Amino acid sequence: MADPVPRADDNKFQSCYILVKNANDGNELGYFGRRWKSGGWYGLEEKTLTFTGEYDSPLQVRFSYLKSNKHPSRLDFRSMNGGDWFGTQATKQSEENVRKYPYVGAALLKTVNEDIGLSPEEFGKAVIVGTKSAPPDSPPPHGDHSVMMGHTPSEYESAIWTYDPVTNDIRAQLISGDGSSPKGSLYYLGGSDAFAITNAINKFKGSKTIVPVTFTCVRRLVSP
Protein backbone atom coordinates (compact mmCIF):
# COMPACT_ATOMS: atom_id res chain seq x y z
CA MET A 1 0.00 0.00 0.00
CA ALA A 2 1.37 3.41 -1.01
CA ASP A 3 2.25 5.99 1.62
CA PRO A 4 -0.45 8.63 2.09
CA VAL A 5 0.16 11.95 0.38
CA PRO A 6 0.93 14.67 3.00
CA ARG A 7 -1.80 17.26 3.41
CA ALA A 8 -1.12 20.99 3.38
CA ASP A 9 -1.82 21.27 7.11
CA ASP A 10 0.86 18.62 7.76
CA ASN A 11 3.50 21.10 6.62
CA LYS A 12 5.30 23.70 8.68
CA PHE A 13 6.21 26.88 6.78
CA GLN A 14 9.19 28.86 7.96
CA SER A 15 10.54 32.26 6.94
CA CYS A 16 13.75 33.67 8.35
CA TYR A 17 16.96 35.61 7.87
CA ILE A 18 20.29 33.79 8.09
CA LEU A 19 22.71 34.92 10.79
CA VAL A 20 26.35 34.08 10.00
CA LYS A 21 28.79 33.33 12.83
CA ASN A 22 32.44 32.35 13.01
CA ALA A 23 32.39 28.63 13.82
CA ASN A 24 35.64 28.89 15.80
CA ASP A 25 34.71 31.60 18.31
CA GLY A 26 30.97 32.19 17.83
CA ASN A 27 31.40 35.85 16.87
CA GLU A 28 28.73 37.25 14.57
CA LEU A 29 30.01 38.15 11.11
CA GLY A 30 26.73 39.54 9.81
CA TYR A 31 23.80 38.26 7.80
CA PHE A 32 23.54 36.32 4.58
CA GLY A 33 23.22 39.08 1.97
CA ARG A 34 20.30 39.28 -0.42
CA ARG A 35 22.15 40.54 -3.49
CA TRP A 36 24.35 38.47 -5.73
CA LYS A 37 27.90 39.71 -5.98
CA SER A 38 29.37 40.77 -9.32
CA GLY A 39 30.29 37.15 -10.04
CA GLY A 40 26.75 35.97 -9.38
CA TRP A 41 27.19 34.31 -5.98
CA TYR A 42 25.83 35.21 -2.54
CA GLY A 43 27.94 36.86 0.18
CA LEU A 44 27.71 38.66 3.51
CA GLU A 45 25.33 41.57 4.10
CA GLU A 46 27.43 44.68 3.69
CA LYS A 47 25.09 46.98 5.67
CA THR A 48 25.20 49.69 3.01
CA LEU A 49 22.74 52.57 2.99
CA THR A 50 20.11 52.63 0.26
CA PHE A 51 18.92 55.76 -1.51
CA THR A 52 16.20 56.08 1.17
CA GLY A 53 18.84 56.38 3.91
CA GLU A 54 18.00 52.96 5.39
CA TYR A 55 20.12 49.86 5.69
CA ASP A 56 19.56 47.30 2.97
CA SER A 57 17.76 44.21 4.23
CA PRO A 58 19.58 40.84 4.22
CA LEU A 59 18.15 37.85 2.41
CA GLN A 60 14.92 36.35 3.70
CA VAL A 61 14.25 32.72 2.80
CA ARG A 62 11.13 30.57 3.00
CA PHE A 63 10.94 26.80 3.25
CA SER A 64 8.61 24.08 4.46
CA TYR A 65 8.85 20.64 6.04
CA LEU A 66 6.57 18.02 7.58
CA LYS A 67 5.62 18.85 11.16
CA SER A 68 6.29 15.24 12.15
CA ASN A 69 9.87 15.47 10.89
CA LYS A 70 12.20 16.25 13.79
CA HIS A 71 15.26 16.58 11.54
CA PRO A 72 14.15 18.16 8.25
CA SER A 73 16.64 17.76 5.41
CA ARG A 74 16.94 18.12 1.63
CA LEU A 75 15.08 21.42 1.90
CA ASP A 76 14.68 24.04 -0.82
CA PHE A 77 15.29 27.60 0.42
CA ARG A 78 13.41 30.08 -1.73
CA SER A 79 14.54 33.70 -1.82
CA MET A 80 11.77 36.09 -0.75
CA ASN A 81 13.56 39.39 -1.37
CA GLY A 82 16.59 38.51 -3.49
CA GLY A 83 18.28 40.86 -5.91
CA ASP A 84 21.17 40.70 -8.30
CA TRP A 85 24.31 42.68 -9.05
CA PHE A 86 22.47 45.52 -10.81
CA GLY A 87 22.13 47.42 -7.51
CA THR A 88 19.22 48.81 -5.58
CA GLN A 89 17.23 50.06 -8.57
CA ALA A 90 15.50 47.08 -10.11
CA THR A 91 15.70 46.65 -13.86
CA LYS A 92 13.77 44.42 -16.17
CA GLN A 93 16.78 42.18 -16.61
CA SER A 94 17.51 41.94 -12.88
CA GLU A 95 13.91 40.99 -12.10
CA GLU A 96 14.08 38.31 -14.79
CA ASN A 97 17.33 36.94 -13.35
CA VAL A 98 15.86 36.62 -9.86
CA ARG A 99 12.75 34.90 -11.21
CA LYS A 100 14.93 32.49 -13.16
CA TYR A 101 17.08 31.48 -10.17
CA PRO A 102 14.85 31.89 -7.08
CA TYR A 103 16.43 29.16 -4.93
CA VAL A 104 19.47 29.45 -2.68
CA GLY A 105 21.53 26.46 -3.73
CA ALA A 106 25.05 25.46 -4.63
CA ALA A 107 27.00 25.10 -7.86
CA LEU A 108 30.37 23.70 -8.84
CA LEU A 109 32.56 26.37 -10.34
CA LYS A 110 34.79 24.83 -12.98
CA THR A 111 37.90 26.70 -14.13
CA VAL A 112 40.68 25.88 -16.54
CA ASN A 113 43.22 25.27 -13.78
CA GLU A 114 41.11 23.16 -11.43
CA ASP A 115 39.36 19.84 -11.75
CA ILE A 116 36.51 20.36 -9.31
CA GLY A 117 34.31 17.48 -8.21
CA LEU A 118 32.17 16.45 -5.26
CA SER A 119 33.37 12.90 -4.71
CA PRO A 120 35.21 12.20 -1.41
CA GLU A 121 38.46 11.51 -3.29
CA GLU A 122 38.45 14.82 -5.13
CA PHE A 123 38.65 18.46 -4.20
CA GLY A 124 35.06 19.59 -3.76
CA LYS A 125 34.21 23.27 -4.09
CA ALA A 126 30.55 24.22 -4.26
CA VAL A 127 29.70 27.91 -3.98
CA ILE A 128 26.30 29.16 -2.77
CA VAL A 129 24.45 30.76 -5.68
CA GLY A 130 21.00 31.32 -7.12
CA THR A 131 19.61 28.18 -8.78
CA LYS A 132 16.57 26.62 -10.33
CA SER A 133 14.79 23.82 -8.46
CA ALA A 134 16.52 20.44 -8.68
CA PRO A 135 15.17 17.06 -7.47
CA PRO A 136 16.33 16.16 -3.93
CA ASP A 137 18.32 12.97 -3.21
CA SER A 138 19.50 12.69 -6.81
CA PRO A 139 22.78 13.47 -8.58
CA PRO A 140 23.05 17.18 -9.38
CA PRO A 141 21.83 18.21 -12.83
CA HIS A 142 24.10 20.04 -15.26
CA GLY A 143 22.81 23.45 -16.25
CA ASP A 144 22.79 27.21 -15.83
CA HIS A 145 22.65 29.16 -12.56
CA SER A 146 23.37 32.68 -11.36
CA VAL A 147 27.14 32.35 -11.84
CA MET A 148 27.49 32.41 -15.59
CA MET A 149 29.92 35.29 -16.20
CA GLY A 150 33.19 33.64 -17.29
CA HIS A 151 31.86 30.18 -16.50
CA THR A 152 30.14 27.48 -18.49
CA PRO A 153 27.03 25.64 -17.20
CA SER A 154 27.92 23.24 -14.39
CA GLU A 155 26.41 20.92 -11.81
CA TYR A 156 24.11 22.56 -9.29
CA GLU A 157 21.74 21.59 -6.45
CA SER A 158 18.92 23.38 -4.68
CA ALA A 159 17.66 20.95 -2.00
CA ILE A 160 20.86 21.01 0.05
CA TRP A 161 19.66 22.39 3.38
CA THR A 162 18.99 20.76 6.74
CA TYR A 163 17.25 22.57 9.59
CA ASP A 164 17.03 21.93 13.32
CA PRO A 165 13.66 23.26 14.62
CA VAL A 166 14.98 23.28 18.19
CA THR A 167 18.28 25.15 17.75
CA ASN A 168 17.42 26.89 14.43
CA ASP A 169 20.76 25.60 13.13
CA ILE A 170 21.11 25.41 9.32
CA ARG A 171 23.55 23.05 7.62
CA ALA A 172 24.26 21.99 4.05
CA GLN A 173 24.60 18.54 2.50
CA LEU A 174 25.57 17.94 -1.11
CA ILE A 175 24.89 14.90 -3.29
CA SER A 176 27.75 13.90 -5.60
CA GLY A 177 27.42 12.59 -9.13
CA ASP A 178 27.66 8.98 -7.94
CA GLY A 179 24.78 9.49 -5.47
CA SER A 180 26.96 9.59 -2.35
CA SER A 181 26.79 12.32 0.31
CA PRO A 182 30.32 13.70 0.79
CA LYS A 183 31.19 15.38 4.05
CA GLY A 184 31.57 19.13 3.83
CA SER A 185 31.39 22.26 5.94
CA LEU A 186 30.37 25.87 5.37
CA TYR A 187 33.06 28.49 4.89
CA TYR A 188 33.14 32.21 4.21
CA LEU A 189 35.68 33.20 1.56
CA GLY A 190 36.70 36.70 2.61
CA GLY A 191 38.71 37.46 -0.50
CA SER A 192 35.77 36.77 -2.82
CA ASP A 193 32.93 37.60 -0.41
CA ALA A 194 31.35 34.21 -1.05
CA PHE A 195 30.14 31.15 0.84
CA ALA A 196 31.42 27.68 -0.03
CA ILE A 197 30.74 24.09 0.94
CA THR A 198 33.85 21.93 0.80
CA ASN A 199 35.67 18.99 2.35
CA ALA A 200 39.14 20.24 1.40
CA ILE A 201 39.42 23.86 2.45
CA ASN A 202 43.24 23.76 2.24
CA LYS A 203 42.92 23.60 -1.55
CA PHE A 204 41.52 27.12 -1.76
CA LYS A 205 43.80 29.99 -2.69
CA GLY A 206 44.11 32.74 -0.08
CA SER A 207 43.28 30.40 2.80
CA LYS A 208 44.16 33.11 5.36
CA THR A 209 40.93 34.94 4.52
CA ILE A 210 38.76 31.83 4.81
CA VAL A 211 36.63 31.37 7.93
CA PRO A 212 34.52 28.34 8.94
CA VAL A 213 30.99 29.56 9.61
CA THR A 214 27.63 28.50 10.97
CA PHE A 215 24.19 29.55 9.71
CA THR A 216 21.29 30.23 12.09
CA CYS A 217 17.67 30.89 11.15
CA VAL A 218 16.48 34.09 12.89
CA ARG A 219 13.01 35.62 12.57
CA ARG A 220 13.93 39.16 13.58
CA LEU A 221 16.86 41.37 12.69
CA VAL A 222 19.09 43.02 15.26
CA SER A 223 19.60 46.70 14.42
CA PRO A 224 23.14 47.49 13.22
Image: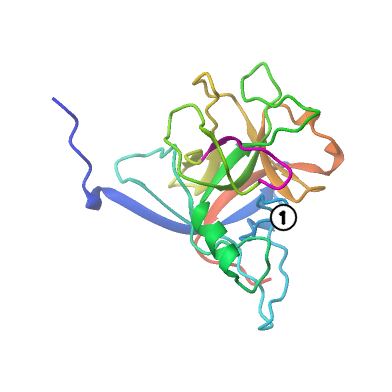
**Residue shown at 52%/20% (left/top)?**
180
Q: Is residue 203 left or right of residue 183?
A: right
Where 123 falls versus 62 (above or below)? Answer: above
Classed neighbour count for the residue bearing mark 1: other residues with Cα under 10 Å, few (<14), some (14–19), many (≥20): some
Q: Residue furthest bottom?
A: 52
Label 1 amino acid? Leu
Quadrant of the image occupied by residue 15: bottom left
Report whether residue 60 is seen. no
Q: Residue furthest left?
A: 1
Where does the magenta region start and end?
Answer: 148-157
**Residue shown at 41%/37% (left/top)?**
71
The residue where tag 1 is placed is: 29
Could you tell me residue 83's position as x and y percent?
59, 63
Q: Is residue 8 left or right of residue 102?
A: left
Quadrant of the image occupied by residue 37: bottom right
**Residue shown at 68%/36% (left/top)?**
109
Front one among 38 and 125:
38
Q: Secondary structure at mark 1?
A: strand
Q: Residue furthest top?
A: 121
Could you tell me residue 189's position as x and y percent?
76, 44
Kindly report the secondary structure that dominates the magenta region of the rendered protein: loop
Could you tell me residue 147's position as x and y percent?
65, 46
